[in-house]
Image (spheres, grey):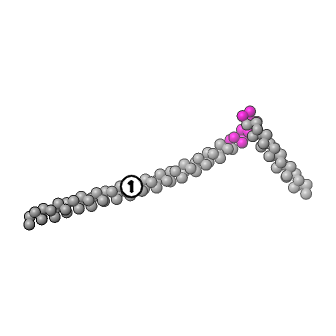
Amino acid sequence: MSNLAEIVEKVEAKVDQLLKKNQHIQQENTKLKELIEQENIEIKQLKQEISRLNLVNKNLKTANALLGSNEYKRETKLKINSLIKEIDECIVQLAE
């Protein structure tokens, strides 16, 4: 009979260990989920920053092209032609 009692005690001890491990794993899982959420927020903010910087970069390239930089002569000519077309359209609308 004492053998059965020892087996029951060992099983209970192992169950307690498993419950503690389970609780620890659940706590760790919760922490990891919070970390993932924080990382997702940071990723979203970084994507917004990338978009903003891409726009700034595009605007700087356009400004550089309008200033007549040798690197952007083609873009400068295209932008000037585009502006001339817009001005012509405005003149036509004003003349009507």
Q: Amino acid at mark 1?
A: Lys
Q: Residue at x 42, y 56 (%)?
A: 33
* Residue 67 lies in the magenta stretch: yes
- In the image, residue 67 lies at what x, y percent? 75, 37
Between 17 and 51, the residue placed more toward the observer is: 17
Q: How many marks?
A: 1
- In the image, residue 3 lies at what x, y percent? 10, 63
Q: Quadrant of the C terminus?
A: bottom right
Q: Quadrant of residue 66?
A: top right
- In the image, residue 26 lies at what x, y percent? 34, 59
* Magenta extent: 60-71
- Side of 92 relative to 3 (left or right): right
Q: Quadrant of the N terminus?
A: bottom left
Q: Name the residue at the top extreme.
A: 70
Q: Residue at x 54, y 51 (%)?
A: 45
Q: Residue at x 26, y 59 (%)?
A: 18
Residue position marked by numbered label 1 in the rendering = 31
